[in-house]
Amino acid sequence: MSPKAKSQLAREHLERALPAEVADDYTEAATWLFASLEAAISALAEQRGVSIEPKHWQKADVAKQLHAQGDVPTDFAPALRMLNDARKEAVYEGVEPDFGGESLRDLAAQVQSGVDLAEAGLP
Amino acid sequence: MTSHPRKHRDGSLLTSGPPSARDLIPHPLRKLHDAVTARARESGAEALLLTGSTARGTRTAISDLDYHLVGEPIATDDLSAELDLHVVSATVLNTRLGEGDDFTQWSLRFGCVVFDEGIIKESIRLIDEKDLWPDPARKEQQARKSLSIARAMMASGDHEAAVEQVRTALTLIARWRLLESRSFPLSRAELPAQLEALGYMKLATGLAATIHGAPPLAKLAAYVEAAHELLDARPASMQGTTRSHAA
């Protein structure tokens, strides 16, 4: 079985995250939203031939780079960092994450736009 | 600035003498450390601790640069995403200490003080005086949840995310079992040796494999199954003289 495309994984992870967001299950929601956005960024990077490293902070740097060079209209790096912090707080400490003034719903909308971009493909 | 003598029967608490926090940080990350320290001081923070594997001198290829900041949040958007800054108020720090949060105690026991206006010293005194120990039941709950997500992540076919999620679940199970056994969990890279000492050989093997590499999905599935069996087994601290565990 060949591996799924990153854009497909991004969509599938998002579909898992959205019901969790509605149910206020912040551990599930933050984990799947983060995985979805990372997969979307990886898909976009592949489309631009940008090599992507496994470390989370390197993916955030790639997200910033894609925005800086005009490939994507949004800098997804802050959302990636926020979701990474949130999932760690939820998973390791078992506390409701601090989204820094944003809501899970806001973050989910940002992830949705990243997934849409990855699926549509860069011009 | 207060001094922090090494003390505690469960292992060292804090280092305030050599090596300094800065000495523990790899050269390429020292500018980042200096920026965090300066901003924390400017913000009027009560304390800054270097934590995680860097504080223990056990960094791996997947390590971030972790801090515990007691005070108000500081700007970090322009800093490397390698930074993992955990911010709490003094009130929240005390609350989490009282609630049995192991992450808070970890920072207090093993973190390296960058600066402290007194809150850290006072918290350590509380741990010592009241013999505070993290609540293993909290860890068990988190471990169960995390293992369930790990299974789903493996089923998704996202290998990279599955490795991470399995590592997370195994780490939480390790911390739970160690806390149950009154052995304080050290940094992630040190957990496999701690587990082996308690006889949790399969868990130690699985965790080490996910820390130092990216095992294929079939291997991950085997680690998860072994971990699942362990979750349903009695903790080591309740098993008399038996020191070897199938999972």
Image (cartoon, rainbow, N blue to C red):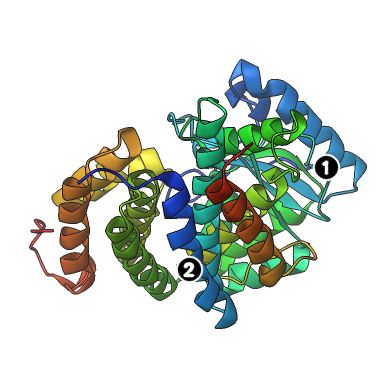
- Residue sitting at 49 percent across and 43 percent down? B12
Which image quadrant for residue B190? top left
At label 1, which amino acid type do we have? Ala
User: Which chain is indicated by disc 2?
Assistant: A
Which quadrant of the rendered structure holds the N terminus of chain B? top right
| Residue behind mark 2 | A15
Q: Residue furthest bottom?
A: A23
At label 2, which amino acid type do we have? Glu
Residue B106 in picture, x, y percent from top left: 52, 53
Query: Is the residue at mark 1 from the same chain as the one at mark 2?
Result: no
**B21, A88: nearer the viewer:** A88
Distance from Cα at disc 1 to Cα at disc 2: 39 Å
Residue B167 in picture, x, y percent from top left: 35, 49
| Residue behind mark 1 | B40
SS for dot 2: helix
SS for dot 1: helix
Can residue B32 be seen from the camera position used here? yes
